Amino acid sequence: MAFTITIEKRSAPGKPASKGFPLTVSLSSPKATLAELKKQIASASRKLTVERQRITTEDKKPLLEDDKPLADLGVSAGQTLYVKDLGPQIGWKTVFLTEYAGPIFIHPLFYYLGPKIWHREFVHSKMQTVAMSLAVAHYVKRELETLFVHRFSNGTMPLFNIFKNSTHYWLLSGFLLAPFIQSPWFSAASVAGTIQDKDSFIYGTAAVMVLAELSNAYTHIILKNLRPAGTRARKIPRGFAFELVSCPNYFFEFVAWAAFTVLTLNPASALFAAVSTTQMWFWAVKKHKNYKKEFGKEYPKRKAMFPFLA
């Protein structure tokens, strides 16, 4: 028995109806999946590829699980659903790999070409060498996590995000941090006799950052194991620092860049750490609220990002 659904295009109030809509879609049965519906819409409207579609009910409840039958999502025959054009899309992995690649090349560039860039000969301090190595290692780790650890609930994101995200990493973490850290003001001669010339200070702060990075990676592995490949399954994260906060990955990221700021004693590092921490705090609060809303009383009592604080 055919399963017929009407598709309206969601548009801003006052705008005329889109050409080709409303669209009547006939599917084989109620067992047809959301993915099949999206393919039908894409075949009727070439601009609306599957990746650009966001399907919602009349009350704006999003339908997210492509592999589920429409009947299981609460859709009945004759119902009207709404599709929103999300605009040009790009893969999450492509965005992540691109945004993280910038600092990997920018930091060594300013390290090795520093004397030419600053038009002044100087010998790099041990602090500068360690800082460059830590910055590159941080983003190499992120690239590896993107390839082998992270599982994305959505395959794509808006194309504009590659420019927005790359601006943050290439400019703030790359062209802001690298030139000032790898400048003559932090050369071997400039830091001689200061705390930044002491091995205990350099390797102590570096060790804190490395431990934070390893802890961050471990939390990502815990999150990966919660979601079987190819699914949108969501479970309550447990174990390790998840017993204290909802987003320990953000907390350890904060600790890592705080240690980097102490190591470099550089205003540029402090600014990058502050901007990053602020953004992660907003993400953590949002995720914390979503966890509490989704799991209700089952969700353990824990803070959003900072243990025992907030």
Image (tube, rainbow, N blue to C red):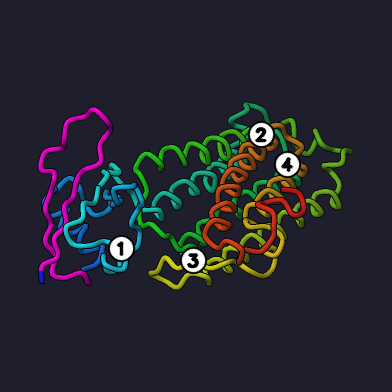
- The residues colored magenta run 2-31
- The residue tagged with tag 4: helix, strand or loop? helix
Which of the two labelled residues, at mark 1 and mark 2, occupies the earlier sequence position?
Answer: 1
Q: Mark 3 or mark 2, which is nearer the start of the sequence?
A: 3
Give the class, few, some or many, for how many residues have Cα within 10 Å of label 3's Cα (few <14, many ≥20). few
Mark number, residue 74: 1
Q: In this picture, is 188 found above or below 104? A: above
User: Which mark is first along the chain, 1 or 3?
Assistant: 1
Q: Residue at x 62, y 44 (%)?
A: 281
Verify whether residue 22 appears in magenta.
yes
Most foreground residue, 128 or 176? 176
Mark 1 surroundings: few (<14), some (14-19) or many (≥20) residues within 10 A: few
Residue 168's place in the image compared with 129, above or below, is above
Amino acid type of the residue tagged 4 in the rendering? Thr
Kind of residue sitting beneath label 2: Leu
The image quadrant that residue 33 belongs to is bottom left
Label 3 vs label 1, nearer the camera? 1
Q: Nearer the viewer, mark 1 or mark 2?
A: 1
The spot of residue 253 in percent (x, y) is 65, 51
At label 4, counting other C-alpha atoms closer than 10 Å, the crowd grade (few under 14, some 14-19, many 20 or more) is: many
Q: Position of residue 26 (x, y in %)?
A: 11, 61
Q: Which badge, 1 or 4, is on the more N-terminal residue?
A: 1
Badge 2 is on which residue? 271
Which label sits in the foreground, 3 or 4? 3
Q: Work out how far the residue at label 2 is from the one at label 4, CA to CA, in angstroms.
A: 9 Å
- The N terminus: image quadrant: bottom left
Secondary structure beneath disc 2? helix
Which of the numbered marks, if any, corresponds to residue 261?
Answer: 4
* Distance CA(mark 1)–CA(mark 2): 48 Å
